[in-house]
Amino acid sequence: MIVCCSLAVCAASALAADQFVNVLTGGTSGVYYPLGVALANNIGKAMPGVKTSVQATKASVENLNLLQAGRGEI
């Protein structure tokens, strides 16, 4: 019973906490950066409690490395 209550409290607090989504793009002068900004804005509007950020990168290889390291979500 205590374990169930503890799990319920932990789950509720996890749902109540803000979540963060880091959108990885390409360079700021490229095409993918504005798309990443638009995607981040749409995610922020559609999902209350989700805070988004956009990170300019050196493109595909760096994006994959950052995703693998857990430093980006999209």
Image: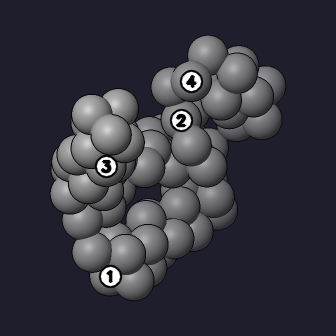
Badge number at residue 72 = 2
Kind of residue indicated by mark 1: Lys
Disc 1 marks which residue? 45
> Where residue 52 appears, x then y in whole percent?
34, 56
Mark 2 closeness class: few <14, some 14–19, many ≥20 residues within 10 Å? some
Which image quarter holds the N terminus? Answer: top left
Badge number at residue 24 = none
Mark 3 closeness class: few <14, some 14–19, many ≥20 residues within 10 Å? few
Please report contact status of discs 4 and 2: CB closer than 8 Å, yes or no: yes
Q: Nearer the viewer, mark 4 or mark 3?
A: 3
The secondary structure type at the circle numbered 1 is helix
The secondary structure type at the circle numbered 3 is helix
Residue nearest the observer in this picture, 27 or 37: 37
Q: Earlier in the sequence, mark 1 or mark 4?
A: 1
> Where residue 18 appears, x then y in whole percent?
22, 52
Q: Earlier in the sequence, mark 4 or mark 3?
A: 3
- Up the image or down, 34 lies above or below 6; here it is below
Q: Residue at x 53, y 35 (%)?
A: 72
Q: Is residue 7 left or right of residue 25?
A: left
- How far apart marks 4 and 2 lie (CA) works out to 6 Å
Disc 3 marks which residue? 8
Kind of residue indicated by mark 4: Gly
Residue nearest the observer in this picture, 24 or 10: 10
- How far apart marks 4 and 3 lie (CA) works out to 26 Å
Residue nearest the observer in this picture, 32 or 15: 15
- How far apart marks 2 and 1 lie (CA) works out to 19 Å
Disc 4 marks which residue? 70
Please report contact status of discs 1 and 4: CB closer than 8 Å, yes or no: no
- Up the image or down, 48 lies above or below 66; here it is below
